[in-house]
Amino acid sequence: MMTVREVSAKTGVSVRALHHYDKIGLLKPAALSEAGYRLYDLASLERLQLILLFRELQFPLKDIRGILESPAFDRNRALDQQIRLLKLRREHLDNLIALAAGIRVMGVNHLSFEPFDMTKIDEYVAEARKSWSDTPAYKEYEQRREGRTREDEAALGEGLMDLLAGFYALKDGPADAPEARALVGRLQSYITEHFYTCTPEVLRGLGHLYAGGGSFTENIDARGGEGTADFAARAIEAYVNLQ
Amino acid sequence: MMTVREVSAKTGVSVRALHHYDKIGLLKPAALSEAGYRLYDLASLERLQLILLFRELQFPLKDIRGILESPAFDRNRALDQQIRLLKLRREHLDNLIALAAGIRVMGVNHLSFEPFDMTKIDEYVAEARKSWSDTPAYKEYEQRREGRTREDEAALGEGLMDLLAGFYALKDGPADAPEARALVGRLQSYITEHFYTCTPEVLRGLGHLYAGGGSFTENIDARGGEGTADFAARAIEAYVNLQ
DNA sequence: ATAAGGCATGACGTAAGGGGAGAGTCAAGG
DNA sequence: CCTTGACTCTCCCCTTACGTCATGCCTTAT
């Protein structure tokens, strides 16, 4: 667990920015100390890395949050888009270099504004953004998120984590045990009720997300116990297959 | 003469941005129509091109204004710096591409924040900025500009242009005629009084600027008449050489 | 135990415009 | 001559992503 200053030193992100990211819900600390100090873990760093990658491409922080929390989020697809965008911007820079060099040698007469044209990049950004936010599930999620305060959100998150932690007690039984299936059912209802309509497909996606070895896995295991996320994923898989 | 809309179409800069650049004195229209419409000419476009080049590198608009108006401004030096900076940024992008690709194939375990590090670029920017603003003449100029309103500035600019236009009447005589030398003297006093201490060296630099074929030349000739800027430059040269 | 430094919250400031209101202006057609 | 629609002007408030204090608690080393 690292304090703000340590994270800042490791990542180059200012302490103030971390405060900001916390406030807008983009990067919440993994825990709070007794005194209310923000404490971050490796999962936080991982998420921060992705945040910086999107930020580097001028994505609005709100969008980054939306993307990272999207039920459709797929790291590899996101990275592929990032790479494509970065390459577009590199091309853009090449054009600018050529322009500057052109002015340098040809003098004032060389008037040209195409190199400043960002429409291609902007279009790709818009397209990428749409590809993340255009699913009905995401729109629903966004909409519901509107009218909630930060406390509401925290409480809802707690509720979700509590449900997930419940898988720990069952993790030595079969993934399709009645208790496990019941818990998955409650999970699905909870998500549908508070976040977005949780279809079997979405549920299956969540299962993969939970067991994927990333920050979700860590957070869930930190709450329930080692293996919780993995069992939850298997229980979800079994549940969906038996629907 | 083009209206805001036309400039916007040609350059991709929004109308609102042109308003903004006008308000902060970064790019004033070449003229105003009867009704107060902003009218731009080729010299405006030329200046706008440089503005965009600096803006692309995240220079604050205030700094861009300072640089373009600096008595030490040298387009070629500026362009060389721009090219260097653009290349640094391209390197930065290359690093980011490598990082994204690395995460893509190596998964979550690949935690690294160096590619986000901008200190090298920031340092070069700071250095470049200093190289423009660190001359005593520039500092003086900046300081005097502080306490003036937009009207003050416009009036002072008018006064300067009036003086320069005065060279037109003398342009068929010798560059070192007594009238020409007197006018250069008044020009020097005017600049020293209202802008910055106009040493002979600075004066010579201004002469080159006026006759360089850029926006200065055009503006001066538009005010005085064809050949005004060129004669002014020659008169200044003669004046300085005879000091 | 006392000072120094880290941390928190809150309020305000900033840059570079965006967006819209309300009003004047210009060119073309009826 | 008048109207209409497209432009333009000047306020003025809004936004994003933080920077910058101010003020006060927390923690740690001496």
Image (spheres, coloured by chain):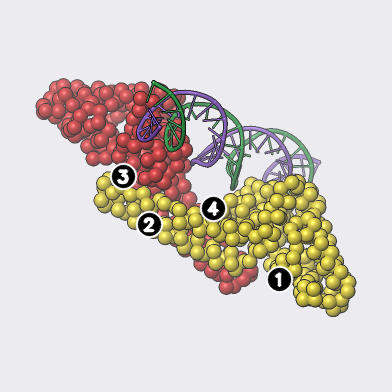
Chain colours: A yellow, B red, C purple, D green
The disc, 2 or 1, on the residue closer to the chain's N-terminal end is 2
The mark lying in front, picked from 2 and 1, is: 1
On what subunit does the disc labeled 2 rest? A
The disc, 4 or 2, on the residue closer to the chain's N-terminal end is 4
| Mark 3 residue type | Arg
On what subunit does the disc labeled 4 rest? A
| Mark 4 residue type | Gln
Quote the CA–CA distance across marks 4 and 1. 29 Å
Q: Which residue is under mark 2?
A: A95
Element class at badge 1: helix
Q: Which residue is under mark 1?
A: A208
Quote the CA–CA distance across marks 3 and 2. 19 Å
| Mark 1 residue type | His
Are callouts 1 and 3 both on one chain?
Answer: no
In the picture, measured across the screen, residue B213 lies left or right of residue B32, that is left
Q: Quadrant of residue B8?
A: top left
Q: Which residue is under mark 4?
A: A58
> Is C20 or A222 nearer to us in this picture?
C20
**Residue B111 percent across, percent down from the top left:** 61, 65
The residue under the point 81% across, 64% down is A187
Are callouts 4 and 3 both on one chain?
Answer: no
Element class at badge 4: loop
Q: Which residue is under mark 3?
A: B75
Q: Quadrant of residue C28?
A: top left
Residue A85 circle label = none
Q: Looking at the image, do the residues carrying marks 2 and 1 touch, with CB atoms under 8 Å apart?
A: no
